[in-house]
Amino acid sequence: MTARREDRRSKPTRRLSEQEVELERLRAEVAAWRARAASLPVRADAAPISSSGRVVEPVYTALDLPSDVIAATGLPGNFPYTRGIHPTMYRGRLWTMRQFAGFGTAEDTNARYKFLLERGQTGLSVAFDFPTLMGYDSDHPRSEGEVGKCGVAISSLADMETLFEGIPLDQVSTSMTINGPAAMLFCFYVAAAEKQGVPIDQLQGTIQNDILKEYMAQHAWIFPAEPALKIIVDLFEWAAEHTPQWNTISISGYHIREAGATAAQELAFTLANGFCYVEHGIARGLDVDSFAPRLSFFWDVHNDFFEEIAKLRAARRIWARHMRERYRAKEPRSWKMRFHCQTAGVTLTAQQPHNNVVRVAYQALAAVLGGTQSLHTNALDETLALPTEESVRIALRTQQIIAYETGVPNVADPLGGSYYLEALTDQLEREAEGLFAEIEAQGGVVQAIESGWFQRQIAHSSMRFQAEVEQGRRTIVGVNDFVEEAEAPVEILKVGDEAEQTQRERMHRLRASRNRELVQQRLEALRTAAAEDRNIIPAMLDCARAYCTLFEIRHVLEEIYGSYREPIFF
């Protein structure tokens, strides 16, 4: 009996000893392999550097994994969600297939939405024109020449009603990419749903509403940082009660990456922004579990295939850990990062544009292998103009081929356990945590924006990458290698000036037909709510219902909050 007890006690020790022996054997084997491999020739164009500048080893083994990799990885649907937020992932439900679309007038874009829905798209994604992104009406002097050119022109509830005419808002999920005036466009959307007779608690979708990354990278802002953050928290608070199925923010790494950031910078800067929004909500006195489940994310999917998959896995793990341990969220829905992905617009080339179909396909596959909940695939001609119907059809079919022909959705996180992928996931997580410490040393997100720290970090990474391309150290097919002198042009979509004239006439009719006295009353109520530091969403929604225009709402709030002026950083 005593011998049996001793034998049982010794088993874990024997197993540990066997494991140590196996690791020593592996170390010796890898060392011998490296010595042999070092004597062999390699391709002159073989770049052991990722697109983010990270050294990539020629082989990965169990020696490259952290000792607690199994605990850190877990299973799909289990904390910390490295392998996905749902147990069955795409076996239960495919990702939402969205195509970012908008041009010309609301009628033009309405027709494109119906075209896409008829061909199997499962969610809508609104691209607004530049005047709308900046909070200007179509007939404002600063809008001249830009109306409808790079997105749809939406200046009031009337335009929003037209945009979704014949599209039941209780049956589609809508994403709206807008930031500075995000709350205003959201109110137009809610009012349009009311006009359709749709209960607003049934609305599903996302408003981007991420102002911090605008200061860092994209520059479509209106108000200074603190008032802008106040409006965002107002929306968190109001939507939690009135539109509980609506994602109140899409915290975006996409634009940070498009501006030139590395994968680790996109990961860290975006998550830091997310934590900043959480902290502002908690500071308002909101229960973190009342708004955190409706926070979503938006990631860029670049060319470096495995790095992008690892980035998405690391993002889920970091968010889950910080939400549970740092912010004391008790609800598992607050720990789960839900996100949309878009293939990388910055990787599209004007040269040999049909190559972009291949780039987008691999990027889309990386997004799916990384566990995205929603996906936009860029069209081959988007580096030249807004996409044609033919090119956007190919982009949508790319997603459908992945979904229905490849077999990839049949297994959750099918690359999980790969030595390389797990090591890269862990490495990106460590790099992100290091960047969090640097941000804290700058005084936090807002202070680092105001000092230009983020902007300089992104600019330096962008310059490094561009220098590599220009010096031929990084190959871009069709641009600095495999170049063709004579290329056949592709057909592009051209948006004329008719949209601007149409919008001007529509704005004139709107102002003549609406109740002017009611408009002034509603705008004054909004001014009072802002001046008294109350939640402004109810008053803003009343303005939308009265057909106040986008710029009228912006102007009233600007009088109270002021305007943001970017300091000179370089």
Image (cartoon, helix red, strand yellow):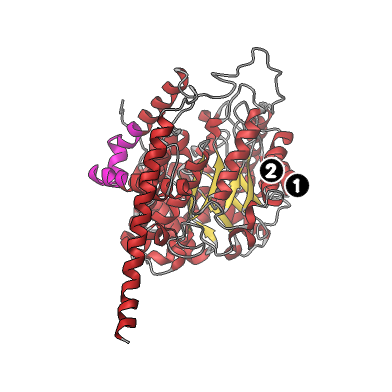
Residue placed most toward the observer, 520 or 312: 312
Q: Residue 156 placed where, x, y %? A: 58, 45
Is 347 displayed left or right of 492 in the figure? left
Is 348 displayed left or right of 333 in the figure? right
Q: Which residue is the extreme one toward the right?
A: 118
Q: Name which residue lies at 31% across and 43% down.
A: 435
Q: Residue 194 placed where, x, y %? A: 62, 60
Is 135 displayed left or right of 562 in the figure? right
Q: Which mark is residue 396?
A: 2
Label 1 with label 2: CB-CB less than 8 Å? yes
Residue placed most toward the observer, 176 or 257: 257
Q: Tell me the SS state at disc 2.
A: helix
Other-residue count near label 2 (Cα within 10 Å), few / some / many at <14 / 14–19 / ≥20? many
Q: Which mark is residue 119?
A: 1
Quarter of the image where one finds residue 347:
top right
The mark lying in front, picked from 1 and 2, is 2
Q: Is residue 349 magenta?
A: no
CA separation, marks 1 and 2? 8 Å
Q: Residue 209 placed where, x, y %? A: 47, 48
Quarter of the image where one finds residue 170:
bottom right
Q: Name which residue lies at 47% across and 44% down.
A: 179
Mark sitting earlier along the chain (1/2): 1
Q: Residue 94 placed where, x, y %? A: 64, 56
Task: Tell me the kind of residue under disc 2.
Answer: Leu
Q: Tell me the SS state at disc 1.
A: loop
Q: Which residues are magenta?
A: 434-457
Q: Name which residue lies at 59% across and 63% down.
A: 88
Task: Tell me the kind of residue under disc 1.
Answer: Arg
475 shown above or below 221: above
Residue placed most toward the observer, 480 or 240: 480
Note whether residue 235 is visible. Answer: yes
Is 570 displayed left or right of 365 in the figure? left
